[in-house]
Image (tube, helix red, strand yellow):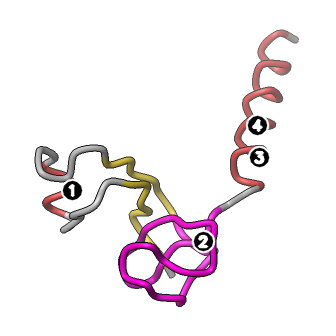
Amino acid sequence: MFLQKLHQRLRKRRSDFMAGKDKACRKCKLLVKGSKCPICNGNDFSRSWKGVIFVKDPEGSEVAQLLEIKVPGRYCLWVK
């Protein structure tokens, strides 16, 4: 019973997080809420994306360098 309630709570938290799913810029993969990407000034977005990476220090992050991320922010790993 305890595990079922815990599982339900975790599912609700995930659905709450995903309910306000941000749009991903198709060009730079930045997750945005507005109508214009602050990095590339593009307006081609998708709500179909997977994976999140939070980049604080692009210069010191090997992952950010591998993904060619130059600006701190929240990025998706895959965008349709």
- Would you name the residue on which mark 2 appears? 23
Residue drawn at the location 45% of the way across and 83% of the way down: 26
Specify the amino acid type for callout 1.
Answer: Ala
Position in image of residue 32 (x %, y %)? 55, 67
- Would you name the residue on which mark 1 appears? 64
Q: What number is the disc on residue 54?
A: none
Q: Are marks 2 and 1 in contact (CB under 8 Å)?
A: no
Q: Residues within 10 Å of mark 2 (few under 14, many from 20)?
A: many
- Which tag is nearer the camera, tag 2 or tag 3? 2
Task: Tell me which segment is drawn in magenta.
Answer: 22-49
Left or right: 38 as drawn, with respect to 15: left
Specify the amino acid type for callout 2.
Answer: Lys
Which element type, helix, strand or loop, lies under badge 3? helix
Q: CA distance from mark 2 to mark 4?
A: 22 Å
Q: Which of disc 3 and disc 2 is earlier in sequence? A: 3
**Quarter that holds the N terminus:** top right
Q: CA distance from mark 1 to mark 3?
A: 27 Å
